[in-house]
Structure formats: structure tokens, C-alpha cells
Image (spheres, helix red, strand yellow):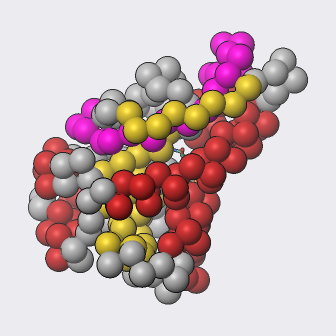
Amino acid sequence: MKNIAIFASGAGSNAQKIIDHFRGSDKARVALIVCNKPGAGVLAIAAHEGIPSILIEREGFFHSDKYVQLLKEQQTDLVVLAGFLWKIPANLVQAFPNRIINIHPALLPKYGGKGMYGHFIHEAVVAAGEKESGITIHYVNEKYDDGEMILQERCIITPDDTPETVAQKVQALEHQWFPVIVERLLSGL
Ligand code: GAR
């Protein structure tokens, strides 16, 4: 049985899709939810699903090996960032080479980097008059939104689209593809 740790900061809709995807599987399970934001929706999902969750604090995350050790102790095979808004520190990247992936709600390298998350992205995409947007799933390195790409999927943007409707289109792609890609990567580990 492979162990997935999901890192999330927000509502957790992608976390929920991954949990649903592996429910009843004998190959992999979501073994841990890691969150940096008290009260985030993803914590309620973890509680409802009976999945252990931890609320991490800045000092331990950025200036110690505390959470690296915890992930190792839990025999984590894959770390999945699903709307996790802190940068991943070098010690964590190095402890899990090619075993940390992120989903980004745009076609990287456009609309990536610090401060580019959630609705800010969709607002920028609409303001720029883009004809398409989409998702990027990529390996995580020590820079924001920079590691090797695993998958991009696109959606069309029409002149009628608003940041909200673009968000819906992008979220549909995320929910469709993220669990499938997680499964594909795990089968190669
Ligand atoms: C997702 O759209 C994800 O791509 C995005 O946050 C959302 C989380 O939604 N991530 C980023 O913007 C990272 N730069 P969720 O909590 O419902 O899964």
C-alpha cells in the first residue's frame, strides 16, 4: 500500500477528489493531510473522512527537519500539493526527490510564481484577453511553480468568460486529471 500525503491550504476540493479516487483501493491511500491554515475546509474534509491531519507551523516547517521526519516516519511515498500556498523548503524537496507534485491553475510558465494563486490567476488571465487557460501538474523544486512538467490540459476562454467562469472550467480539469495523474505516478514508484 502506497501512502499519499496531501498538502493543502484551502477548501480542499482537489484533496476530496483524490480521497474519493483511492477509497477502497488496495494500492494507495491518502494517509495524511498537511495544512498550514487553521479553519481551512480541507481540515473538515480530513475529519469527515477519518484521515489524520496536522496543522503545521512556520518555524518547524522552514527551519527544522521536524516535518520531513514525520513524513518519513509515516512512510510517505508521494507528497501532493493541492492548493498549498507555502513554498516547499529545500530540505523537504531533497528528502523526496521526484516525489512531490503540485497542481497549478494556469498554463505555466505563464501566470506562475509568488502571489499567483487562486482567483488572482483567473483575473489576470481574463484581463490579458487570453484565449485559453488550463492546468499544469509538475514536479516541485525549490522555486515556485518551476519544476519539470508532468501534464498540461487546456480549456477555451471566450469573450463572455469572467474570472469566475474560468475558475469553474479550470477546476473541472483539475478534478478530472489530478487523481488520474497521482495514480499514474504512484504505479511507477
Ligand atoms: C486549486 O485551483 C489549485 O490549482 C490552486 O488552488 C486551488 C485549490 O482549490 N493552487 C494554486 O493556486 C497554487 N499556486 P481546492 O482547495 O478546492 O483544491
- Residue 10, given in percent of the width and then of the height, sits at 54, 57
The extreme bottom residue here reads 50
| Residue found 26% across the figure and 69% down from its top | 76
Q: Quadrant of the N terminus?
A: bottom left
Task: Depth check: give the residue in front, 103 or 180.
Answer: 180
Q: Image quadrant of residue 113?
A: top left
Q: Is residue 138 magenta?
A: yes
Does residue 90 appear in the picture of this structure? yes
Quadrant of residue 36 in the image?
bottom left
- Residue 127 is at least partly visible in this image: no
Instruction: Provide residue 40's location: percent of width, then percent of height.
Output: 54, 64
Q: Tell me where the magenta segment starts and ends, as one range.
A: 124-143
Residue 24 drawn above or below residue 111:
below
Determine if the magenta segment contains residue 39.
no
In the picture provided, is 24 more to the left or to the right than 77?
right
36 left or right, relative to 61:
right
> In the rendered view, would you say 183 is above or below 75?
above
Give percent across and percent down for residue 147.
31, 34
Q: Quick check: 165 above or below 52? A: above
